[in-house]
Image: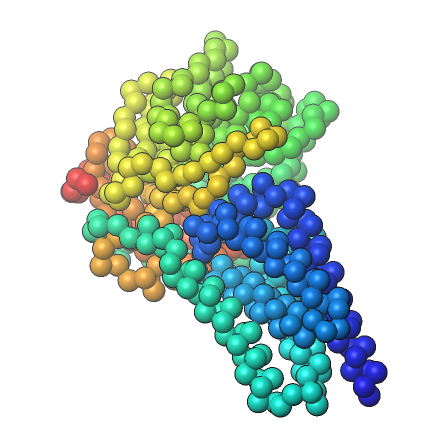
Amino acid sequence: MKNYRNLVIILISYAYIFLFCYAAVSKLIDFELFQLQLGQSPIISTYAGFISYFVITIELLICGLLVFNNTRSTGLYLSTGLMVAFTVYIYLILNYADNIPCSCGGVLEKMTWSQHFIFNLIFVLLGIIAIALNNARKIAIKTTVLKLSSSIILPILLVVMLFSSSDYMSKKENPFIRKFIPHAIEKEGSINLGVNSYYFAGVSNDTLYLGNRTSPFLLTSVDSELKTMKEFPIAPQPNHYLFKRPQLFVNDGAYFLFDGTIPVIFKGDLNNKIARLILQKEFYFDLLNVGDNHLVFRSQTKNKGLILGQFDFNNSTLQLSDSILQKQTDGFFDVDGSLLHDPILKNHVYVYRYRNQFVVMDNSLQNIKYHSTIDTVSVAKVQSQELSNGQNKMNAPPLVVNSNGAVYDGVLFNISNIIGRFEDPKQWQNSFIIDLYSTKEQLYFGSFYLPKADGTSNAKIFINKNYLYVLQENEMLKYSFAQNVLKHFSNGESRKP
């Protein structure tokens, strides 16, 4: 029995040794990236510099303690305590934070956060078993329970204190007050799409079209009543291009297949799977809107700043503008945002992700108007640095102000990430909030809550006539607008921010 007990203790100890050695070496191999990933955490970003050295040191120290018989008991307590801290950290990330990249490195980085949480729980349980077996008949049960309780409780308190002291959550508190539109939307129906990789490609004759990031050459149509789905493949001609990030855009009876990393644009009729090459230029882009005989795109300059551009199909002219997106810090992360298209007014809207501003422009990138949202974040709260390989990375968690949106008939429907005064935090956990703005002038119409599906952290929205369509997880939902929303598509009362 004693030999069996010792074997189990040794196996668990060496499992911890392998785990911590592997994790520490993975972090050391790309230490710069590890520090940046810690800096992006909403819980420990303030202490990222210290923690990056501490975690690697304590992992290697524990490995040394577990190797020798006379120090193994201390190593088991520290191993279990450290794993408890990691587990609590993941729990807080899963329940209270935005999407944060994993900082473990190696194979562990391939796990989802939920899988990582279960993995850590298993190792916590193994640590408790090893401690119990190691202390059997050596010391009193009371002493073992006391030490084990300390190894569990103290790490929990430490991580919770770090979380509480983080200023990330407090940055979401703003002094503005929203005006809520009563009974703004009413659910009309839904359809299960099967997977969560769909995105809105556009609309034609009241039929909605979806693209699929995992099946990029498959266009899916959904009738406006969300009753039937039809799929048809797309065959680009010529087909020798090595696509990296192909996307689809539907406009006025035609679909466009584009990939800004090559860069090429194909066009096809919605009744024909063959898409013909219509544009191959030397400008690269990552966002694109297709309008009447033109396209508007976002590109990157040689000095790694983001700019907007326009291409006219009629005369094949290319126009770049480096003055529309207004730089505040680095000209890249600080001007990041969403490029939206108004199918009724035929203009384009660029919504900044990290500040309270959006830009309205026509097809030629003229008649530019700058409007503000009602929150108070006028300067992007982003921190970045350039790595040795030339890539730019954020080294602190950014404050996301505007996460997504849609434009229809002069109204911007903006999904806000900022909570205002007198708003219920529990309501925020269960809903997205959509603010309505005029794209014609500086006017705020009001706001409403959009119910959030369980386990989802983002939603994609699309507006067509009197309806709001929403993609959440693997489901598409349809909501009708009340008259107090529809009136803003033409004229309506509102108030200025």
| Number of marks in the rendered image | 0
Q: Residue at x 57, y 89 (%)?
A: 142
Determine which quarter of the picture holds residue 408. top left
Render colour scheme: rainbow
Position in image of residue 137 (x %, y %)? 70, 90
Image quarter in which the C terminus is found: top left
- 19 to 378, vertically: above or below: below
Q: Residue at x 71, y 56 (%)?
A: 21
- 236 to 181, vertically: above or below: above
- The residue closer to the viewer here, 170 or 221, is 170
Tell me if residue 399 can be seen: yes
Q: Residue at x 64, y 42 (%)?
A: 30
- The residue closer to the viewer here, 75 or 416, is 75
Position in image of residue 331 (x %, y %)? 42, 27
Position in image of residue 308 (x %, y %)? 43, 23
Determine which quarter of the picture holds residue 125. bottom right
10 left or right, relative to 50:
right
Position in image of residue 145 (x %, y %)? 57, 84
Tell me if residue 190 can be seen: no
